[in-house]
Image: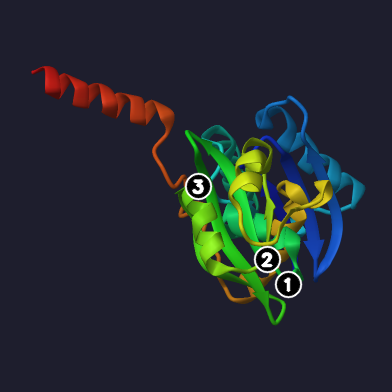
Amino acid sequence: MKILAIDSSSVVATVALVEDEKLLAEYSVNHKKTHSQTLLPMIDEIMKMSETDINTLDAIAVSGGPGSFTGLRIGSATAKGLALVINKPIIHIPTIDGLAYNMYGSSKLVCPIMDARRNQVYTGIYHFEDNRLVADIPQYQEDINTLIEILNEKDLPVVFLGDGVDTYRETISHNIKVPYEFAPVHMNMQRAASIAALSEQYYIEKKTVSANEHQPDYLRKSQAERELEEKHNMQKIIQ
């Protein structure tokens, strides 16, 4: 079983290649370049360095959202294009699940947070049970202060990770009442290796879709759609 994994849901572009529970290659970039510039060259590089023929892949795994609208579209289009070329399925991994899997083996609650702006985060609450990721609250969009209240009510130690940590570190530190910590730098952001590891489980469980079936999960409307909707609502009020 050989799977190529892609994650472009945040500012980080990351790709990985796994074969039978062995990580063959991983390549991540978090530096001022668009995913349209980085993803395909990164994929080409790890395929060359691992001496892997793309036609030997069994599936393409992709972080399916939520996240950056542009990033998700680029990741989805890349995965669909590759899957169509080699006629292999796509494995859609929820972005927040993939982030949570960075903390594999943790005894604490795991709470990924991605900045969704306006005091909102894409998040979920997880724990590991018998070496499997369990979603106490599956990925969704929430107000950061409400999320902290939910965690306080659970009264269990928690670890935070994701790009929302930089934005809401102070808010968390001032309001959290349970023992907490922030993930170290090498585990804090999206990693295609985590997407790849989860995708092996999904593949065994036959949780795959065709390239034509795959669609990103945005969780909310794009900014352009929201602005258009607000404009229409305002016109109705004026009329």
- Disc 3 residue crowd, few under 14, some 14–19, many 20+, Cα 10 Å: some
Mark 1 surroundings: few (<14), some (14-19) or many (≥20) residues within 10 A: few
Q: How was this image coloured?
A: rainbow
Rendering quarter of residue 132: bottom right
Q: Position of residue 95 (x, y in %)?
A: 59, 52
Cα separation, mark 1 vs mark 2, equals 9 Å
- Farthest residue to the top: give it: 238
State the SS at label 3.
helix
Disc 3 target residue:
145
Q: Residue at x 57, y 47 (%)?
A: 80
Q: Quadrant of the C terminus?
A: top left
- Report whether 212 appears left or right of 163: left
Residue shown at the point (13%, 24%) measured from the top left: 236
Q: Is residue 163 visible?
A: no
Please state which of residues 159 and 227 is positioned toward the viewer in this rendering.
159
Q: Would you name the residue on which mark 2 appears? A: 157
Identify the mark nearer the N-term, 1 or 2: 1
Q: Is residue 90 above or below residue 82?
A: below
> Residue under circle 1?
107
**Residues at marks 3 and 2, CA–CA distance in whole angstroms:** 17 Å
- Where disc 2 sits, the SS reads loop
Distance, label 1 to label 3, CA atoms, is: 24 Å
Q: Who comes first in sequence, dot 1 or dot 3?
A: 1
Q: Amino acid at mark 2?
A: Pro
The residue under the point 72% across, 39% down is 13
Where is residue 122 drawn, in percent x and y? 53, 48
**Mark 1: amino acid:** Ser
Q: Nearer the viewer, residue 21 or 153?
A: 153
x 70%, y 82%: residue = 130
Kindly check if marks 3 and 2 are in contact, taking CB atoms under 8 A apart as contact.
no
